[in-house]
Amino acid sequence: MSLDDLPTKTEHAGVSAPVVRRVDRPVPQQARITRAEELRLQLADEIVRGALAPGAPLDETDIARRFSVSRTPVREALRQLAASGLVDARAHRGAVVARPTLDRLNGMFEAMAELEALCAGLAAERMPAVERARLEAIHEELRFLSHAGNPERFHEVNERFHNAIYAGSQNDYIAEMTLATRVRVQPFRRAQFRNLGRLAKSHAEHDRVVIAILRGDRNGAAAAMRAHIELVRGEYEVYSVSL
């Protein structure tokens, strides 16, 4: 997912007005995820699981050879991982696996919770009827996936769910900031879906957000989303202890 998925303009009553483009629609796989993104997700997963230990070197040439790619997507993947605090990029010495400090991770989740709560609250007031219907459809898809027990597929559709709420805020600047923050927190959010029973819990938390948005309850939607992200942080802590 990239910031290119966010907003352009639309014509409304003959006047050009800025809106957030709907980012929850499925797009072709090749457009949705780049090779650099695939590498970032795989390397992030190995780091979070401990398969790549803190301090382990991340040589661009070795990684490119391992995944049969050029060094360009490897370099971009490492840059993105450094932004998440998973990689320590040292000038003239190469990159090594890092781990964000507890304070850093808590700060990232705190920012994520407030930004997502802001989006949810605005969406409760501003999301058009057609987008509310689309949010309900995504939510229903997640309900089926929560029973299927496929965390990877659940994660993909979960991205669409949150994107729909960002778009529903009708504020492209806030949506961009929220998405940029999510990219940094994503490896930790993704990992916690492996916890036993987490998919069903996540769907139940989403349910409270969706109900508040459909009711037009700004404060309720913001509170439900904030609580959801705080629970995600707690679930990641449970996951990390289990490693």
Image: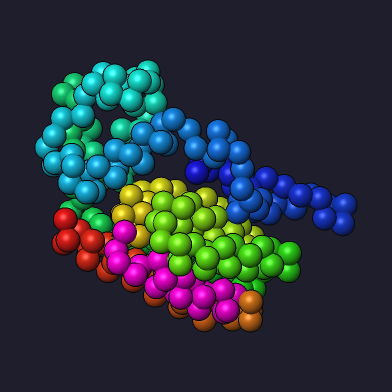
Determine the residue positioned at 67% across, 45% down: 8
Q: For this rendering, which residue is in front, 111 or 232?
A: 232
Determine the residue positioned at 56% across, 74% down: 210
Determine the residue positioned at 67% across, 68% down: 132
Q: For this rendering, which residue is in front, 166 or 56?
A: 56
Q: Position of residue 77 (x, y in %)?
A: 35, 33
- Asked if residue 119 can be seen in this view, the reply is no
Q: Position of residue 58 (x, y in %)?
A: 21, 29
Q: Quadrant of the C terminus?
A: bottom left
Left or right: 3 in relation to 227 = right
Determine the residue positioned at 15% across, 30% down: 57
Q: Residue furthest left?
A: 55
Residue 36 is covered by the magenta coloring: no
Q: Residue furthest right?
A: 14
Left or right: 39 in relation to 236 = right
Q: Main secondary structure of the magenta part?
A: helix
Q: Is residue 173 above or below residue 211?
A: above
Q: For this rendering, which residue is in front, 9 or 56?
A: 56
Q: Position of residue 7 (x, y in %)?
A: 63, 48
Q: Position of residue 107 (x, y in %)?
A: 28, 60
Q: Which residues are magenta?
A: 194-213
- Asked if residue 61 can be seen in this view, the reply is yes
Residue 208 is covered by the magenta coloring: yes
How did the renderer colour the structure?
rainbow
Q: How many marks?
A: 0
Q: Residue furthest front?
A: 148
Q: Is residue 182 above or below residue 121?
A: above
Left or right: 194 in relation to 218 = left
Q: Is residue 5 above or below residue 238?
A: above
